[in-house]
Amino acid sequence: MLHSIRLSLLSLIIPSLPFLASAQRTPFAVGTASAAPGQKATGYLEVPAGVDAGTNIPVVVVNGAKPGPVLALVTGAHGTEYVSVIAVERLIVDLDPAQLSGTVILIPLVNIASFEQKVAHVNPVDNKSMNRFYPGKADGTQTDRASFLITKQVVDRSDYLIDYHGGDLDESLRPYAYWGATGKDSQDQISKQMVLAFGLDHIIIWHNRPSDLGASRYLDNTASLRGKPSIVVEAGYAGTVETDDVALLINGTLSTMRALKMLSGAPHYIENPVWLEKTIDIISDGPGIWYPLVKRGSYVQEGMKLGYVTDYFGKVILEPRAPEAGVVLHVNAVPSLKKGDNIADLGVVASKAPL
Ligand SMILES: [Zn+2]
């Protein structure tokens, strides 16, 4: 019953948004990609050289034959979270402008240097995470300048945004999504419908996000603070590209687009997902060799041993335990540990679903 109420609420809310693209059925350009209605175009967001090298970030515009909202799909901020990149690559090929109401902006690989050089977590050009420096600035290092361009060219021109991530080369991760409420009820209800339509069965309620427009840090938060309902989704782990993980992200995207009335057909809403009220990072306090005793997706009790760390002579120097009961969202996938590395990330199950 509750489910049908949610569905009717969605149909009431989503068409009432003012769509950026619906007023004019003219070519839609992002960077050098310009697509007329009913067409698909490729191009680049050209990040100019500054204190360090410039870069060209690939962008695809799918301009639907029918009017509708603008949805941005952005991935590859962490260029070795491969499933998230491959899923959006597939959507570039599969999305058909003839079937589409509205416009989709696809950015399949923000962090090209990470992908090409197989460097996890950061942009090797400036050693910065490419999902921590939004809204960016025109005169910073490459990550700052790329973030600035994405804010101006992609976020500001979209009605909705999905940011894709996953387990990096050293992270064994089970799929999950983030939903961050802004306090604006109508917007939060839409982003909640998006995350339910996406269909991942564990959803983190992201509290206490930065509220400063000038220091929004994360891409989805940048869009949320600018009034655009946004979610983050994560699937894939440790360099693998498994069909099931890719399918989760592709099918979730298509279902969300149906919920936004950009594609025909009914969305598939996840029923009774596991809502997580917080996450706990377990951080290594020194170097060593990691031996896990839990896997991604394991549920653990408070106090349960997650694994152990030895020095290079085999002596156990650390036995990290779960500070609270929860689910292992990701666990370090490789034996290498240095001080400050994330050993595991636990999600704590919320006592009730958000309203
Ligand atoms: Zn990531």
Image: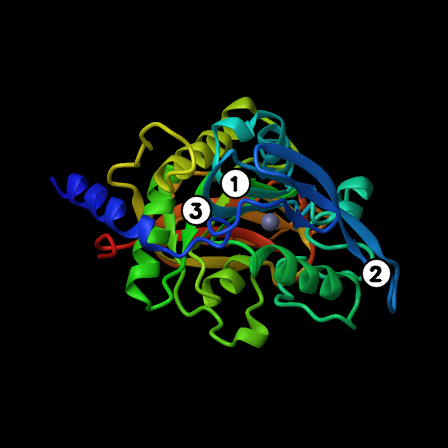
Q: Position of residue 134 (x, y in %)?
A: 62, 66
Give whichever of discs 3 and 2 has the lower sequence position: 2
Kind of element beneath mark 1? strand
Secondary structure under the numbered disc 2 in the rendered image: loop
Residue located 37% across and 48% down the image: 203
Q: Which mark is residue 48?
A: 2
For the residues bearing labels 3 and 2, Cβ distance under 8 angstroms: no
Three-letter amino acid code of the residue under disc 2:
Pro
> Residue, x 51% and y 50% (percent of image)?
21
Q: Residue furthest left?
A: 1
Q: Using the image, tell me which numbered label, if any, was put on residue 177.
A: 3
Picture mark count: 3
Q: Which of the 4 image quarters holds residue 341? A: bottom right
Q: For the residue marked with disc 1, what is the amino acid?
A: Leu
Q: Position of residue 102 (x, y in %)?
A: 48, 41
Where does label 1 land, which residue? Answer: 173
